[in-house]
Image (cartoon, rainbow, N blue to C red):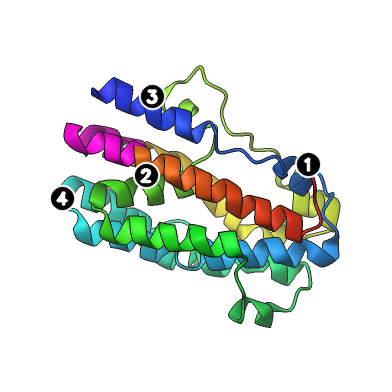
Amino acid sequence: MNQAEFQEQLLQVMEQKEHWAWSQFTGGVVAKGKLHIHMEQEYEVYVRDFPILIGKAYVQCPIAQVRQELAENLFEEETGGLHAGRPHPELFLLYPEGLGMDLERFNRITLLPNAKKYREYLHQSCGSLGWEIGTAISTLFVEGTKHDRSVLDANAPARPAPPLKDHPLVRHYGLDVSYLALTKAHRGVEGEHRDSAWRCVTQFVAEDKRPLVVDAMSRALTLWKSYRDDVAIACGLSR
């Protein structure tokens, strides 16, 4: 598998990172009283521990240039020191706070069955399967979207970035835009993080490791979709 083939297979995985229920989440279909389920599962599955996932990839990596990229990402996620001013997991909790949710719930979350499986895979793949898989899963899959081709191809459609006043939580649930600090932070660093992720994986993963990375990404996609199925059903959604 040459570099171009490797990149294309990774892009094809990312282009499948789309879930049938997402349009219902962004369209305000979820009852406000069940919205906490979505936020709690996201927080427990990966948001709170995302800096740890990056750190697990970092400590396995022997390549200084990749470590430097991971370290910058980790520093921003853990501290907000480069852009956001606060750790990103803390900024995430502004969403439920602004919606009047009981934040104590986020200290005692019970994961849905497929959420637990997906979370376990994230920690396994980032922590014990080599820096190549750890970097791909944390920086490409978890942080990436179905629009990632636009990172590498200026002619591909970019991820939409509507005005903050049109954010689904603002439009459908009455969240004040002042609580969208994480959305602002992500928009501020997204381009840099996406460039970094694709550069580290496509340029530094050795040829013999490339099929393993693609397989790991495909496995993450399967588990992610099952996780999102569980969340959608728990929130009262159906196809």
Whole-angstrom CA distance, mark 4 to mark 3, is 26 Å
Using a 10 Å C-alpha cutoff, classify the residue at mark 2 as few (fewer than 14 neighbours), some (14 to 19) or many (20 or more): many
The residue depicted at 47 percent of the width and 20 percent of the height is 154
Q: Amino acid at mark 2?
A: Ala
Of labels 3 and 1, earlier in sequence is 3
Whole-angstrom CA distance, mark 2 to mark 1, is 27 Å
- Nearer-the-camera pick, 74 or 179: 74
Q: Amino acid at mark 3?
A: Glu
- Residue 81 visible: no
Task: Please report contact status of discs 2 and 1: CB closer than 8 Å, yes or no.
Answer: no
Q: Give the magenta range.
A: 198-214
The residue depicted at 75 percent of the width and 40 percent of the height is 23
Q: Is residue 96 left or right of residue 117?
A: right
Q: Nearer the viewer, mark 2 or mark 4?
A: 2
Which label is found at residue 216? 2
According to the image, label 4 marks what residue? Answer: 64
Q: Give the percent coordinates (x, y) of residue 96.
A: 71, 68
Q: Nearer the viewer, mark 3 or mark 1?
A: 1
